[in-house]
Amino acid sequence: MKELKHKIFSQVENDLEKIETALKENLGAHLEVVTQSASHILFSGGKRLRPLLMVLAARLCNYKGDLDYTFSTVFEYLHVATLLHDDIVDEADLRRKKPVANSIWGNATAVLTGDFLLARSLSIGTKTGKLEVISVISEITENMSQGEIHQLMKKGDITLSEAEYMDVIRRKTAVLLQGACQIGAIIADVDKKKEAALANYGLHMGYAFQMADDLLDYTSDTESLGKKVGADLREGKMTLPLISALQKADEKDRQYMINVIEDKNFSEDDFDQLVRLLDKYDGIAYTRKQALFHIDTAKKELEIFDSCPARNILFDIADYVIERKV
């Protein structure tokens, strides 16, 4: 895992530095409090996966312009906007090992800073001069909002189906990675087949990324994860490991799992027992299997492109998504 991460980083280090510069230069907030509250998450160690995917997708499509790094900021601003809003909705304490922004600046400022970042994304998107870009960004923001609302409506609902779960993560996570890859293709003016292939690569990467993220709530630790282990469970999020295990569990174990899900003050021992039951009924193994399926599907979408450094990095990033520990 460390070797793969080093391999990727050594090839994209320059890209990440330029993305970081672009994120700072294009923030464009007129009020210091907005800059501070946005920067609290924006520059707290994010992986920059979304803007990096856009830059690599554009490179794969032989983009010849000089604004790819500027345009890539759209996807990190959108991502951070959702994190600011999510932390309020979820009543979270930590994000990336730091207190959540709303615990410092208050809910109102955090919400409005998130709104600013959404607007800033659209503003930067208009600079591409392409109506398709604005359309994709607008659709992403609509989907992310509806995905979060759907998840909120199903909070703690043990009847949530796998199909509904897939719809939620498509909207709240996958469409952002899909859009990043698609817009990389659009600004490079490639044909629709290649645009669709990159969009599909991003979509399946998004599915796998969220599944891997959901697994970390049960397989990682607080120090590595940057937030409390079991936070998703306390927030009532019904993720695939739970959904799958509940379907297979016998009545006694299923009832135990339900009791833990419904008790927001569950003990550490209760959580550990729940994780053992997720293992027993293959909830963790099944989720990993599904994530691997989407990684394989994502890679196959890139076969339409000739082998080149950008394509190879996209392959490696796909492997990293499923193997990451944080």
Image (cartoon, rainbow, N blue to C red):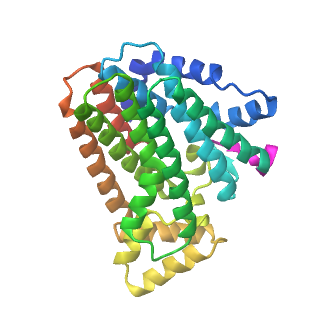
* Location of residue 14 in the rendering, given as x and y in whole percent from the top left corner: 47, 15
* Location of residue 59 in the rendering, given as x and y in whole percent from the top left corner: 34, 20
The reply to whether residue 268 is in sight is: yes
Whether residue 98 is in magenta: the answer is yes
- Residue occupying the point 36% across, 59% down: 287
User: Residues in magenta?
Assistant: 96-107
Which picture quadrant has residue 42?
top right
275 over 130 or under it: above or below: below
- Residue occupying the point 53% across, 70% down: 154
* Location of residue 309 in the rendering, given as x and y in whole percent from the top left corner: 29, 19
**Front residue of 229 and 109:** 109
* Location of residue 205 in the rendering, given as x and y in whole percent from the top left corner: 36, 43
Q: Is residue 180 left or right of residue 123?
A: left
144 over 176 or under it: above or below: below
**Front residue of 204 and 64:** 64
- Residue occupying the point 77% across, 51% down: 107
